[in-house]
Image (tube, rainbow, N blue to C red):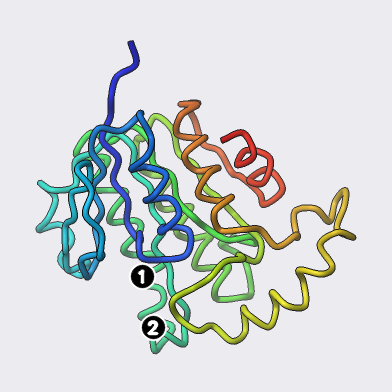
């Protein structure tokens, strides 16, 4: 009989995180789902344990961050963060600290949303930040580590992101032309990314895995 596990999700108020939280609560794999965030979500569920935390003091909440599978959907924009320094703190520092703490608390799998083009040597600050996040998370002794690098995310956001909305309108009609090597650049639904994350956790493949956008689309289709 399969062990029933605890999942922890960070960033459940976001585009991918919102879909993923719904999937985790429906999944028979998890008897408890811990959601951590700055604010409580308007959601009540018998499996859901909401923890409102100050991410700048995350280590002080370590006792509440115990789970088998950790799903990290934290992310912001430089515009929303207000500066490159604040952006780096959210997209790198918080993610790395979450990995460190949950690994110390015995987490087996860590699955995180990164970005297409993540590269420590990138000339673009966004991609460089994501690359450094991936590099530093890999220092933790998880049995399985998954980095998801989606292309442009599609879906309804609560917050307005003009640049992404414009790109979505331009790219979506062209996705049918993106085949072969171009398939990984296709815009992808946030819900598909969430499904791929849950499916990867269910498969429990040990080691480090990088999921490009076309792979994410195929894995998500299995769920």
Q: Position of residue 77 (x, y in %)?
A: 47, 79
Q: Residue at x 12, y 55 (%)?
A: 61
Mark 2 lies on residue: 81
Taking the image as shown, residue 105 lies to the left or right of residue 12, namely left
Q: Position of residue 198 (x, y in %)?
A: 47, 39
Residue 150, quarter of the rendered image: bottom right
Q: CA distance from mark 1 to mark 2?
A: 8 Å
Q: Position of residue 213 (x, y in %)?
A: 67, 52
Residue 66, labelled with which disc? Answer: none
Give the tally of numbered discs.
2
Q: Nearer the viewer, residue 188 or 119?
A: 188
Q: Residue at x 34, y 16 (%)?
A: 2
The residue tagged with tag 2: helix, strand or loop?
helix
Q: Answer above or below: position of 34 versus 126.
A: above
Q: Answer above or below: position of 186 versus 79.
A: above
Mark 1 lies on residue: 90
Taking the image as shown, residue 47 lies to the left or right of residue 26, namely left
Q: Please report contact status of discs 1 and 2: CB closer than 8 Å, yes or no.
A: yes
Q: Residue at x 20, y 70 (%)?
A: 56
Tell me the crowding category of disc 2: few under 14, some 14 to 19, or many 20 or more residues within 10 angstroms, Cα based.
some
Residue 26, quarter of the rendered image: top left
Q: Residue at x 53, y 70 (%)?
A: 156
Taking the image as shown, residue 169 lies to the left or right of residue 9, namely right
Tell me the crowding category of disc 1: few under 14, some 14 to 19, or many 20 or more residues within 10 angstroms, Cα based.
some
Q: Nearer the viewer, residue 137 or 156?
A: 156
Q: Position of residue 118 (x, y in %)?
A: 59, 60
- Quadrant containing the C terminus in the rendered view: top right
- Quadrant containing the N terminus in the rendered view: top left
């Amino acid at each position: 009989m399969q062990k029933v596990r605890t999942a922890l999700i960070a960033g459940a108020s976001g585009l991918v995180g919102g879909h993923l939280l719904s999937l985790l609560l429906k999944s028979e794999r998890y008897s408890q789902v811990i959601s951590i965030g700055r604010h409580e979500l308007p959601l009540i569920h018998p499996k859901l344990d909401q923890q409102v935390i100050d991410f700048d003091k995350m280590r002080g909440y370590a006792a509440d961050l115990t789970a088998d599978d950790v799903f990290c959907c934290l992310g912001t924009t430089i515009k929303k963060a207000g500066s490159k320094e604040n952006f780096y703190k959210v997209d790198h520092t918080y993610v790395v600290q979450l990995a460190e703490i949950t690994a110390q608390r015995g987490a087996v799998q860590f699955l995180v949303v990164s970005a297409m083009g993540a590269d420590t040597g990138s000339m673009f600050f966004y991609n460089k930040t994501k690359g450094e996040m991936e590099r530093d998370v890999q220092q933790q002794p998880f049995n399985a580590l998954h980095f998801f690098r989606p292309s442009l995310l599609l879906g309804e956001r609560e917050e307005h992101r003009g640049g992404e909305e414009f790109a979505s309108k331009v790219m979506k009609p062209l996705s049918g032309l993106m085949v072969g090597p171009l398939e990984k650049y296709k815009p992808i639904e946030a819900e598909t990314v969430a499904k791929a994350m849950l499916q990867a956790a269910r498969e429990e493949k040990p080691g480090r895995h990088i999921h490009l956008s076309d792979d994410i689309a195929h894995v998500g289709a299995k769920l």
